């Protein structure tokens, strides 16, 4: 009986001791925040997994209450002052990425998920040339072709008297674009009825699961250890989804085998693909070419990182401009810029403070502390943007509110040595897609409400309601 009590009592005492340490003795105990947040990680589990809240939204209230730095976990701080963003993601910082966040996708390697700076830098140096402004000159035709395809598919749906789910329409456009760019081939999501390709639906359905996997790393590792074939048998609608996932895999294998057997084929490609760079030993500092698994990881990383973000920017831009139709007659490229400011990104891109500590927002932060700041807290800051919650593309026009000064606060692609290197491709997609939609269609909302546009932070934005629907009538030439 005594041993049984010990089995029960010891874990309880250890848990109580850990909570006491976290609240009173931990190096971050001096930083303000909700007591439960500092006491245990379960506070965030309750908020994000059980209550399905977007913590970044509540943090606006918490920063007003506690100040510019809020303790959101036993070993995690969130910053609210815009200037802190540039300090956290400074080009001079070489901190590791937080494994709890970047381990969620389940990839063992890849430019986006590498935790160590030196790994990410080597891969970044390999891939960066294919994303350069010069390289985009050869990609522009691909982007225009897919934008024209998008417009054609929308026109067909309009002729059938159907309104358009613009979330899935834009994600189909960006998915086909990033896949064609990365691999030289795609799944033709733009041809799917109502833009509901099973792969698009699967990617969207996966998002609500990610907060759970983030908070329970042991379960996450177990889940990713299950063979893919078994997972496919357990998934709903797997008979449609499986062929799409295997098609993506086949695209990678087919393109890879073509290159391996006929390297000269690369010379015929209209633009560089991932294989041009990653199969070139001279491009790697280590002179070692990645294996097939690493090629898969990098390819899928680029697809998942590059598809939703641009599409979500287009979504928010169209929703806001359809509520202010007079903007369409007045503005051109500024629409894309202001839409980036409204990108639904509440995830705190957490980093680990390196040995020696750091000074952020005037405070000394101990080594090993997880720090981060959501892009949302820069873009919605009244300190930087007057009437921050108002969609005002004209603020970017030359001569208004110091448009050049505002550029440094547009941080949709993050900052520092780990910022998104796909920025030039993203801008090309945004400019071309916005121009295509505005020139080709007279658009009006189809009953979309503010509630339909509410999103939940699931590492990427998840829209649980109806999405943005619009009537898109082709403009008569």
Image (cartoon, rainbow, N blue to C red):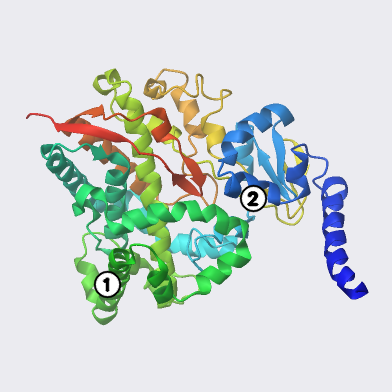
Where is residue 119, by image quadrant?
bottom right
Q: Is residue 389 left or right of residue 148?
A: right
Residue depicted at 88% across the width and 49% down the height? 25
Label 1 and label 2: CA atoms lie apart by 42 Å
Which of these two is toward me, 409 or 346?
346
What numbered label is drawn on residue 255? 1
Residue 19 location in percent, x, y? 82, 52
Which residue position is annotated with label 2?
A: 45
Q: Nearer the viewer, residue 125 or 56?
A: 56
Q: Residue furthest left?
A: 477
> Nearest the camera: 168 or 133?
168
Q: Position of residue 223 (x, y in %)?
A: 53, 69
Q: From the viewer's perspective, is the residue at label 1 or at label 2 nearer?
A: 2
- Which residue is at 48% across, 34% downward? 410
Location of residue 169 in the rendering, given as x and y in whole percent from the top left corner: 27, 45
**Horizontal placement of 428 versus 126: left or right?**
left
Q: Is residue 177 above or below residue 160?
A: below
Q: Quadrant of the C terminus?
A: top left
Is residue 89 in view? no
* Secondary structure type for disc 2: helix
Q: Taking the image as drawn, is residue 391 in sight?
A: yes
């Amino acid at each position: 009986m005594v041993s049984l009590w010990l089995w029960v009592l010891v874990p309880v005492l250890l848990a109580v001791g850990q909570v006491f340490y976290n609240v009173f003795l931990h190096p971050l105990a001096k930083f303000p925040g909700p007591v439960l947040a500092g006491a245990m990680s379960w506070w965030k589990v309750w908020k994000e997994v059980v209550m399905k809240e977007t913590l970044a939204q509540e943090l606006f209230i918490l920063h007003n209450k506690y100040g510019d730095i809020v303790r959101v976990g036993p070993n995690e701080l969130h910053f609210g002052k815009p200037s802190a963003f540039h300090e956290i993601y400074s080009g001079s910082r070489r901190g590791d990425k937080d494994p709890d966040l970047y381990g969620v996708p389940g990839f063992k390697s890849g430019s986006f998920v590498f935790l160590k700076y030196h790994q990410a830098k080597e891969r970044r140096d390999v891939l960066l040339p294919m994303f350069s402004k010069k390289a985009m000159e050869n990609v522009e035709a691909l982007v225009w072709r897919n934008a024209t395809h998008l417009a054609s598919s929308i026109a067909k749906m309009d002729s059938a008297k159907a309104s358009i789910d613009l979330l899935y329409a834009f994600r189909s456009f960006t998915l086909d674009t990033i896949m064609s760019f990365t691999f030289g081939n795609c799944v033709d999501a733009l041809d799917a009825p109502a833009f509901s390709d099973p792969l698009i639906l699967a990617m969207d359905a996966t998002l609500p699961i990610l907060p759970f996997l983030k908070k329970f790393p042991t379960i996450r590792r177990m889940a990713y250890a299950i063979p893919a074939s078994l997972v496919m048998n357990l998934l709903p609608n797997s008979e449609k989804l499986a062929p799409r996932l295997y098609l993506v895999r086949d695209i990678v294998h087919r393109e890879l085998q073509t290159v391996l057997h006929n390297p000269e084929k690369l010379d015929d490609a209209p633009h560089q693909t991932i294989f041009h760079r990653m199969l070139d030993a001279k491009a790697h500092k280590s002179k070692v070419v990645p294996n097939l698994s690493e090629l898969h990881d990098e390819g899928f990383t680029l697809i998942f990182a590059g598809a939703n973000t641009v599409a979500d920017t287009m979504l928010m831009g169209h929703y806001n401009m359809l509520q202010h139709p007079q903007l369409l007659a007045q503005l051109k490229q500024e629409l894309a810029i202001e839409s980036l400011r409204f990108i639904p990104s509440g995830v705190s891109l957490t980093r680990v403070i390196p040995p020696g500590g750091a000074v952020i927002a005037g405070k000394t932060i101990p080594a090993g502390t997880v720090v981060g700041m959501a892009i949302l807290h820069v873009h919605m800051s009244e300190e930087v943007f007057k009437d921050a919650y108002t969609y005002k593309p004209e603020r970017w026009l030359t001569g208004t509110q110091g448009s050049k000064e505002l550029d440094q606060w547009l941080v949709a692609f993050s900052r520092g040595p780990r910022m998104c290197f796909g920025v030039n491709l993203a801008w090309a997609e945004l400019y071309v897609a916005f121009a295509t939609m505005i020139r080709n269609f007279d658009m009006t909302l189809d009953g979309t409400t503010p509630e339909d546009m509410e999103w939940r932070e699931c590492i990427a934005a998840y829209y649980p309601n109806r999405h943005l629907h619009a009537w898109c009538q082709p403009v008569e030439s």
